[in-house]
Image (cartoon, rainbow, N blue to C red):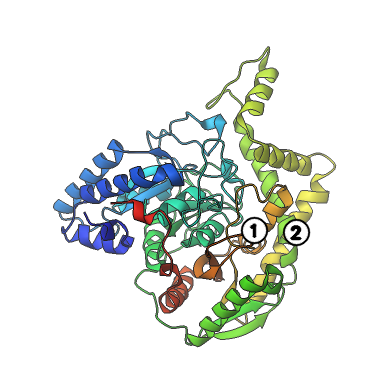
Amino acid sequence: MSKETIESSAAAIAGRVGARELSAAEVTEAALGRIAASDDAVGAYLTVLGDGAREHALRVDARIAGGESLPLAGVPLAVKDNMCLTGTRTTCGSKILENWIAPYTATAVQRLLDAGCVPVGKTNMDEFAMGSSCENSALGVTRNPYDLSRVPGGSSGGSAAAVAAFEAAIGTGSDTGGSIREPGAFCNAIGFKPTYGRISRYGLIAFASSLDQIGPLTRTVEDAALAYDAMAGFDPMDATSVDRPVETAATHLRRDLKGVRIGIAREFDTAKLGAESHACYARAYRDLEALGAELVEISLPTADYGLATYYLIAPAECSSNLARFDGVRYGLRVEGDDVQAMYEATRAAGFGAEVKRRILIGTYALSSGYYDAYYVRAQKARTLIAADFAKAFETCDLIASPAASSPAFEFNAKSDPYSMYLMDYYTIPFSLAGLPALSVPCGWVTPEGGSSPMPMGLQLAAPLFEERALLGAAHAYEVATSHATRHRPRLAEVAK
């Protein structure tokens, strides 16, 4: 199979496999070959499925031979390792689940398999999805395919790197405060977080249950729309799943932005990001205007409180969700003199520093005497943030902003937690409001101290359940600007 085929879009691969010009087995073999050739350097995968992927590809080919029409036939899929896939190691990037085997498959993953995807591996991530760089994984190092000295973003860094390095055409990610959008921006990919509750979380190992949302990472907006169409919809197995009809997005992509009002928040001043980044976003806004959009100034007066609000709510929910990892039912168990000693030894050995930090913050915020002062007030602030977005959308159809506070940075560059948390400054408010948002490549910037340009991402967001409008607009911008194709990842040439 030619190199061009494995580097094709998911839509193109599915079209050829569906037309029986290629077999899913051939595509899978090519994907596994690409992983073998490049992943020692990239480190996108914690587990490569190998024979399991080949067996699944044969089942896809049999379905096609039987007359089935599969929208994602034969498309190589990278699954973030906090999503269950029957019979596979599912680790959350943590020592506490390092050898845990999933007994069932997450609904979102199953729907992609039903649509014809072939799972080729489970990808690395910040431990329990807590991080913005993928440096918090306890089980491996993932590097940015565009510069191996830089991070891929997090927490879905493995999936973003796999897609960028052509080791998969679609990657699944989970986004709590920006964990799909930021790695998408860092790795020159589309990172799409749908409306909270639009895609089932059943089978996703929870971090913060009122914020977690599954979404795709892809190389094109069309592929993101195809993945979304396959995954979205009500699931009775998820109590937060929204029972509302899904509007198909992939068949409603557009080529211009005529009649679209795009809000630019006065509070999101890009000048503080540095001259090159500021110029990049200024060009992106002009490009939106050139496509026919009307730029409208909006105000989000409570957006600046997003970071503080998030880092009370998310740790509080994580401290509750992670209480189940105690050495009793599953995962790591470190013996002690009694049950209490076993709990303490297991959690001390199993959790990394960032996970422990957030558990401690969350437990404190929920403790007697502090619950009202911190957690309840944060929830009230969250309501005000959502109200500000609702008011802003009275005068605009979409909102544009940066997707990250900088291009991808070097390993260990963000040595203190606060500087790392600031990376999600632009994405967190949209998560708190539950809004659909995505990152689309918008240009290239040479980072301070860097020798080569790195990708930047433009964040576009829409009102609740307006995924079709969001993806349509992003597609118009993507096609008109072609930022994603201006540079190739440095590892692309190693694959044969």
Give residue 89's position: percent from left, percent from top: 43, 34
Residues 49 and 167: in front is 167
Q: Check disc 1 and give the amino acid type.
A: Asp
Q: Residues within 10 Å of mark 2 (few under 14, many from 20)?
A: few
Residue 380 — which label? 2
- Quadrant of res 126: top right
Residue lying farthest to the right in this orientation:
369
Dot 2: what SS?
Answer: helix
Dot 1: what SS?
Answer: helix
* Circle count: 2
Residues 325 and 347: in front is 347
Residues 156 and 455: in front is 455
Residue 54 — which label? none
Residues 412 and 459: in front is 412
Q: Of callouts 2 and 1, which one flags the residue occurring earlier in the amino acid sequence?
A: 2
Asked if 74 appears above or below 318 in the picture, the reply is below
Give residue 382's position: percent from left, percent from top: 71, 60
Marks 2/1: CA–CA distance: 21 Å
Residue 327 visible in image: yes
Which residue corresponds to mark 1?
424
Q: Residues within 10 Å of mark 1 (few under 14, many from 20)?
A: many
Task: Report the mark closest to the observer, 2 or 1.
Answer: 1
Give the side of residue 418 with respect to residue 204, left or right. Answer: right
